[in-house]
Amino acid sequence: MNTIDYIEFWATKHCNLNCRGCSSCSPISKEWYLDPEKLQQDLVRLRDLDIKVNNINILGGEPLLHPGLVDLLDVVKNVYPQCNLGILTNGLLLHKMGPLFWSKCIEHSIKIKITWFPVTTEEDITKLEEDLKKRGIDYHITRKTKFNKILVENNKSSMESIVRACGCNNAYNLYDGCVSRCTVPMVVGAFNDYFGTRLIDCGRLNIYEATTEEVLDFLSKPNQSCMNCSAHPQKVFWEKADKRPSKNDWIIEE
């Protein structure tokens, strides 16, 4: 069987935190929830292509906002029962999750991957860790004080230098029947519509119109969408986005 080591998908695009420069573009995203039936169709298609997936992460936005999150967990584990399944969350809503959510986390051996942003105190994190340990939940906490600012218009850098600077680490994305090498190709269209920019809108492959070999080959090689990213990404301190975000929250002026 052919193998993809890691793939991720959005449960929601909107968020309860809205970080400036969010890689999912949550500050400019409308309320949206992934349909479990659509997820099942897409994952079954990958499986039917004889593609094994070792690790799957559920992202947002903020995935805990999804009212049917447990259904998404069931779908993934029904299609890929052997995969390692994680939920990437800012953790702010974990204390509100009900018994069914926690029982599904145990049933499916879910790993809760918490991004600790500056809005959360050390005391809150300590309490959260204590609760997760009592529940027997596997977890990991990553403290995040900076974001990578990567997008650039009219890129003059070489593809080689861009790929060398890439920090996506083969974080393949699945969305609406398509796969991409990272999140960027999946957000470019909405970004252009919102800000009137002309970032290169490509980099997605329709899995229903591709063979197994075409999917794996597409994901293994850079494409023109990579030209949206700078060869000189910048580290910027974390902040909440304004009510009216600016394209410069994401775009580097080179």
Image: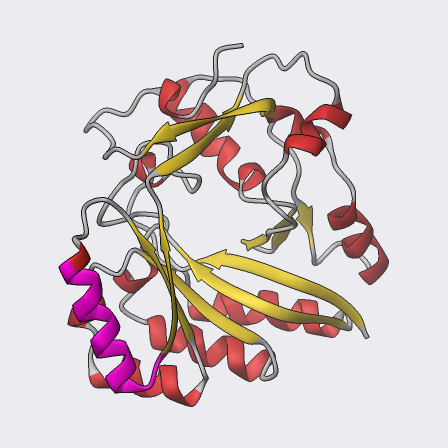
Q: Is residue 5 left or right of residue 127?
A: right
Q: Residue at x 82, y 59 (%)?
A: 211
Residue 12 at x, y = what percent?
A: 36, 55
- Specify the quadrant of the image occupied by residue 80: bottom right
Decide which of 130, 231 is in the foreground and name it: 130
**Residue at far right of view:** 213
The magenta region covers 123-137
The secondary structure that most of the magenta stretch takes on is helix
Q: Was residue 226 drawn as part of the magenta stretch in this picture?
A: no
Q: Residue at x 52, y 81 (%)?
A: 77
Q: Residue at x 42, y 42 (%)?
A: 24
Q: Is residue 243 left or right of residue 162?
A: left
Residue 104 at x, y = what percent?
A: 36, 85
Q: Is residue 254 left or right of residue 3?
A: left
Question: On screen, 75 above or below 27?
Answer: below
Q: Is the N terminus in the top left, top right, bottom left or bottom right quadrant?
A: bottom right
